[in-house]
Each structure stands twice: as C-alpha cells, then as structure tokens.
Amino acid sequence: MTYALIPGAGCTPYHWRPLTGELRRRGHQVIEVDLPCDHPTAGFSEYADAVVDAIGDASDVVLVAHSLGAMTAPLVCERRDVRLLVLVAGMVPRPGESAEQWWVNTGYQGSEEETVDAFFHDLPPERAREALGELRPQSGAPMSTPHPLRAWPDVPTRAVIARDDRLFPRDFLRRVTEQRLGFVPDEMSGGHFPMLGHPGELADLLEKYRLSGCD
C-alpha cells in the first residue's frame, strides 16, 4: 500500500511528518509530495503534474489531500489509477470554480489569516511556532484560474474534518462537504492540521478506510 500525501496551501512535507511516521510504522510506503506552491505561474494542473511525478510507478495508491490540496487531488485521479481518495479539512472544488470563488460560493465567513492561533492552536507553543515557520509563500496563480476539473472522479472518496478547526469550523465544512460530495464527513480531534496534532487518530481512520473494501 502506498499513501501519497498532498499538502495544502504553502505547506511542505514537514507538515505531514508525524502521520508519515505512523503510516511507515504500520508497514506502508509513504510519498510526501512537495508542490511548487511558490512558483509564480504554477496552477492546479502543474500541481497535479508534481503529484503524478512523485507517485511514479507506485501501485495501490491512496491519495490523502489536505485543505487546498483537495483541489489538486481529483485531477490526479483523472490521470492515475487511485484506490482511494481521502480529504482532510479539504476544500472540495466544483468544475470551473477558482479557489478565490470557493470562499464566496461556500459562504465562508471566517478569516484566512495564517497565524498560530488559526492553524496550530492545538500544538505545544514551540511546535506551533515551528510549524508556522515551515509554511512557504503561496503563489496566487491557482487562486484566480477556473478549476480544470470536469467532474468528480469515479474513485471512492472519504472526508475528514477536525472538531476544533478554527479556519474551517466543523459545521461549515460538514455542510460544504455534504453539499458537494453527497455524504457526511467523519470527525476527529484537532485543529486545521490534525496530522500534526493527532497523527495516530488520523492514521487509524485511514487504515479503517483502506480495510473497509473501498474498491
């Protein structure tokens, strides 16, 4: 089994490391994808290229996409044979919708400010500051371009939301996920980065999905 981890806006493989360790201890191959998020002209098509290249010839792939990464993941599913797609605090796109339009179309009323309090409030202070410092600038290139998605891929899909997410409060993201994907997401502990604060719980969910016969 290969887990391919797609980061959110401005994130790096650092933000997956605790989950990566959990999954590798359970005997799985893990690919931490590094997206060209700071490239001034790279959009979601180029992000999908990066994921496909990182996966290479790996088989039996589970894609796990965090936050903005949920806009890249379905494009990868159009190009690769993927066993399962899991969204973690995911921004579920609609065909032709830009990332900027997503905020308006979903009725989002919170703050997009990147702070320790918004993102990492459930981590110890030193780790929270480190996690914030690991974020890279996010290029605006994918934000204003219509999303190239034609239709949601015919791949088993699951979604996870965090109960204490301050960026995407659980009632908001539950509604958006249900409206756009037609099912109620599962809930787990943590803030917007549950893979940092609660990697064991998230790994348990991923393994449950994998073993539940999603083929």
Image: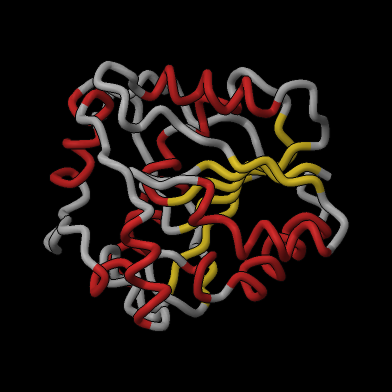
Examine the rendering and report whether any part of residue 185 can be seen.
yes
Residue at 61% x, 70% y: name it: 199
Residue 138, picture quadrant: top left
Count how many numbered circles sit on residues in the image.
Answer: 0
Residue 115, picture quadrant: bottom left
The quadrant of the image that shows the N terminus is top right
Taking the image as shown, residue 131 lies to the left or right of residue 202, namely left
Looking at the image, is 85 positioned above or below residue 119? above
Residue at 75% x, 65% y: name it: 208
**For this rendering, which residue is in front, 51 or 153?**
51
What coloring was used for the rendering?
secondary structure
Name the spot of residue 151 as percent of width and height, x first. 46, 25
Taking the image as shown, residue 90 lies to the left or right of residue 171, namely right
Residue 78, picture quadrant: top right
Residue at 51% x, 35% y: name it: 34
Residue at 44% x, 42% y: name it: 70
Name the spot of residue 25 as percent of width and height, x first. 82, 64
Residue sitting farthest toward the right:
27
The quadrant of the image that shows the C terminus is top right
Looking at the image, is 40 positioned above or below residue 196? above
Looking at the image, is 207 positioned above or below residue 127? above
Examine the rendering and report whether any part of residue 212 can be seen.
no
**For this rendering, which residue is in front, 190 or 126?**
126
Looking at the image, is 71 positioned above or below residue 40? below
**For this rendering, which residue is in front, 135 or 198?**
135
Name the spot of residue 144 as percent of width and height, x first. 18, 26
Name the spot of residue 189 as percent of width and height, x first. 50, 79
Taking the image as shown, residue 154 lies to the left or right of residue 194, namely right
